[in-house]
Amino acid sequence: MAAKAYVCDGAKIECQLCTKPEGELKVTSNEIKIQDKKFANAKDKEKMNLIFQGNCKKSPYQSSPCQAVIKVEDWQGVADALIQDDPALLEDSIIMCTYGGAPIKITDHLQKNEPTSLEPIMAPVVMPAEDPKIVNIDWKEDDKDPKIKGWIEATTLNIMPGEEVRFYLDEKK
């Protein structure tokens, strides 16, 4: 199941019983932001939050502005995540207007699903500026273990991890 988007300040809302059905959700409940916009939560349900410009079709002669008569219940379909102690609103959250008896739906949550920056998948490989070389070679011996006669310890410069280094031993030297 795909993750649902959170609702941001200025989200588009809709009530089919408004003569101008498209409205706007104004977040006043908190200052927590997502993508530089305030998050909406379940407290954003007052007249000052649900902004409609038209009149309610259920009012006598459709004469009452929605803003004057709107009366809502609690938001349904909210997130489990809390924003300042109240559930965050999701793109499919709805709230019922009890005056008109119609649901108010979110039609555009305004959360963008585009990355703000792209990080590289893996770090670039930096090639050495100089030719690889062996700086120092030492013969080491272990007096404690008679099975090990000795080993070579080499200090290198500009040899990349995984590159092969070969030593040719001559018992005379």
Image (tube, rainbow, N blue to C red):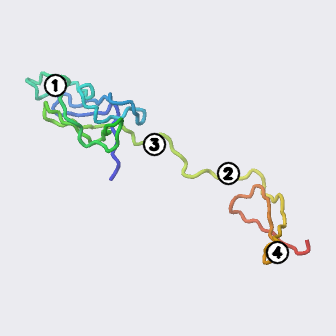
Percent from the top left, x then y, of residue 106? 26, 37
Q: CA distance from mark 3 to mark 2?
A: 27 Å
**Circles 4 and 3 in contact, beta carbons < 8 Å:** no
Mark 2 is surrounded, within 10 Å at the Cα level, by few (under 14), some (14 to 19) or many (20 or more) other residues, namely: few
**Circles 3 and 2 in contact, beta carbons < 8 Å:** no
Indicate left or right for 155 with 11 as reference.
Answer: right
Percent from the top left, x then y, of residue 65? 17, 22
Which label number is shown at residue 126? 2
Q: Secondary structure at mark 1?
A: helix
Q: Which residue is mark 3?
A: 115
The amino acid type, in three-letter code, at marker 4 is Lys
Q: Quadrant of residue 57?
A: top left
Q: CA distance from mark 4 to mark 2?
A: 38 Å
Residue name at image x 21 percent, y 31 percent: 21
Closer-to-camera residue (87/132)? 87
Q: Nearer the viewer, mark 4 or mark 3?
A: 4
Q: Which residue is mark 4?
A: 149
Residue name at image x 91 percent, y 74 percent: 172
Q: Secondary structure at mark 3?
A: loop
Indicate left or right for 173 with 116 as reference.
Answer: right
Q: CA distance from mark 1 to mark 3?
A: 41 Å
Badge 4 or badge 1: first in the primary sequence: 1
The amino acid type, in three-letter code, at marker 1 is Val
Q: Secondary structure at mark 4?
A: loop
Q: CA distance from mark 4 to mark 3?
A: 59 Å
Indicate left or right for 96 with 110 as reference.
Answer: left
The amino acid type, in three-letter code, at marker 2 is Val
Percent from the top left, x then y, of residue 152? 80, 67
Q: Which residue is mark 1?
A: 69
